[in-house]
Amino acid sequence: MMLCWILNESVSVVVVFSWLAVNFYLFIDTFCWYAEEEAYFYTRVILGSTLAWARASAVCLNFNCMLILLPVSRNFISLVRGTSMCCRGPWGRQLDKNLKFHKLVAYGIAVNAAIHVVAHWFNMERYHLGQAKDAGGLLAVLSKLGNAPNESYLNPVRTLYMSTTTELLMTVSGTTGLAISLALILIMTSSSEFIRQSSYELFWYTHHVFIIFFISLAIHGGGRIVRGQTPESLQLHNVTFCKDRYAEWQAAALCPVPQFSGKEPSAWKWALGPVVLYAFERIIRFWRFQQEVVITKVVSHPSAVLELCMKKRGFKMAPGQYVFIQCPSISPLEWHPFTLTSAPQEDFFSVHIRASGDWTEALLKAFGAEGQAPRELCSMPRLAVDGPFGGSLTDVFHYPVSVCIATGIGVTPFASLLKSLWYESQSLPELSKVYFYWICRDAGAFEWFADLLLSLETRMSEQGKAHLLSYRIFLTGWDENQAIHIALHWDESLDVITGLKQKTFYGRPNWNDEFKQIAYDHPSSSIGVFFCGPKAMSKTLQKMCRLYSSADPRGVHFYYNKENF
């Protein structure tokens, strides 16, 4: 079981372990350097090991801040996916886990920030103790450097009479550190799923505090609290020889007073590239926001589903892609992802939207899909569209066998794929079989999708490719009247619910039986499993993919792909 999981998730394991390895390497290498470097010997006399803890965590913090914006640069990810042949299959699935990696990096930032803050708190306390009246020896001498002319200070705390907190907040590093910490706390506490679903605008506003975070990060090192001996001073002042002769520093020619300087700020160097990339990302989004979107058709389907057909200049799509839609009259901030249900061969693009929250309910109401009088197209509210962007479903046609599984409205991503199969069934040499499963609670929801399946069923039969598509529809909810109606018409040639030749199944699929049969029918095949639906079923399907993947590299392997936004 574990071996199958490793084979199926090997690239994810490599990515996570590589990220961890780089973090550990940077931390350990920096820690050892600051713990042993001669230029920081006198700094360690005052601060001890917390110097190394603060600097090591700072480097790891810079590294993760460099990575944090890359997974949320949608256009960059789509560009990589579209231009690189290596970003298909296992590597392509990593691009679909961009938000998971974004969260992982955020946790890395939080952990290193906590270490950095605690370490510097101890550093400030020790700087403060260095100015105490009872401080003596080398510690007292080092802390008092800078009081005489032509001396540079090592201890940034210059008086004993101010508290550590006050002293810290009077420095550039202290004020920017406080801003960074508050911004990070706001961003992380407002990123929970509960807050995103209950108050998206709160999530949006607090997440954009990242601007303050990065500005503060760029100038944080400007305070130069941590200081080390200058290279010129090291040549004149041999630490090994002079450390025990601190009483003679002023008079001895062999041990002149050491000179110190702060380390050049480096955080901006780590973050500059990704910040510039993300700035271009936002410029592209704004440009797309300004582009006109023409609504060509609005259809209200059963089960509170709204179909919008639109046109936009220069819009090109591929099957399985998705777009972000904004309706400024509802909310000027909220962008929501919807998979495209049209095919690239059609002269429009479409989405199907089900009422499942405040925003979608308001959208259906704005377009007259909740019992209001139909509105003229010219009086429809304005929409802005950003995209299209590539998702995991774009790889369906790259496997010899594909298993597509949807629940409820999760069927919309597969509409585009099935339409493309209708148009291009003759030009897909790699694809030999598509299994399609749809699990739905409401019989009325089948109505808007049954026409597509019926036309596809007819087309496949006409072309002699009826074997290419095998679909199973499962109805999980029905009432007594529906049950009686189904029983009375069970022997008819067409299904009483969908009107298709393939009968509807009642209840939930037995995934063990389904996967066992698919594995038996396609030995030694690479099978892509594509899912759009709830997390609970996603975990079940992931387990099935691991369970029925062979440990033998020459055997059957199921590769799990989930639609993520």
Image (cartoon, rainbow, N blue to C red):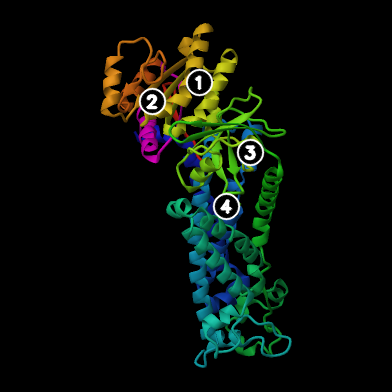
What residue type is disc 1 on? Leu
What residue type is disc 2 on? Ser
What residue type is disc 3 on? Gly
Secondary structure beneath label 2: loop
- State whether residue 478 is above or below residue 63: above
| Badge nearest the viewer, 3 or 2 | 3
* Residue 405: percent from left, percent from top: 43, 28
Q: CA distance from mark 1 to mark 4?
A: 41 Å
Crowd band around label 2 with a 10 angstrom C-alpha radius: few (<14), some (14–19), many (20+): many
Crowd band around label 1 with a 10 angstrom C-alpha radius: few (<14), some (14–19), many (20+): some
* Residue 56: percent from left, percent from top: 54, 63
Which label is found at residue 550?
2
The residue that label 1 is drawn on is 452
Q: CA distance from mark 4 to mark 3?
A: 21 Å
Which label is found at residue 68?
4
Q: CA distance from mark 2 to mark 1?
A: 35 Å
**Closer to us: 549 or 195:** 195
Crowd band around label 4 with a 10 angstrom C-alpha radius: few (<14), some (14–19), many (20+): many
Query: Does the image show residue 10?
Result: yes
Q: Are marks 1 and 4 in contact (CB under 8 Å)?
A: no
Q: CA distance from mark 3 to mark 2?
A: 38 Å
In the rendered structure, which disc, 1 or 3, sits on the residue that comes first in sequence? 3
Q: CA distance from mark 1 to mark 3?
A: 25 Å
Magenta stretch contains residue 540: yes
The residue that label 3 is drawn on is 387
What residue type is disc 4 on? Ile
Q: Quadrant of residue 292?
A: top right
> Which region is colored magenta?
522-548
Secondary structure beneath label 1: helix
Secondary structure beneath label 3: strand
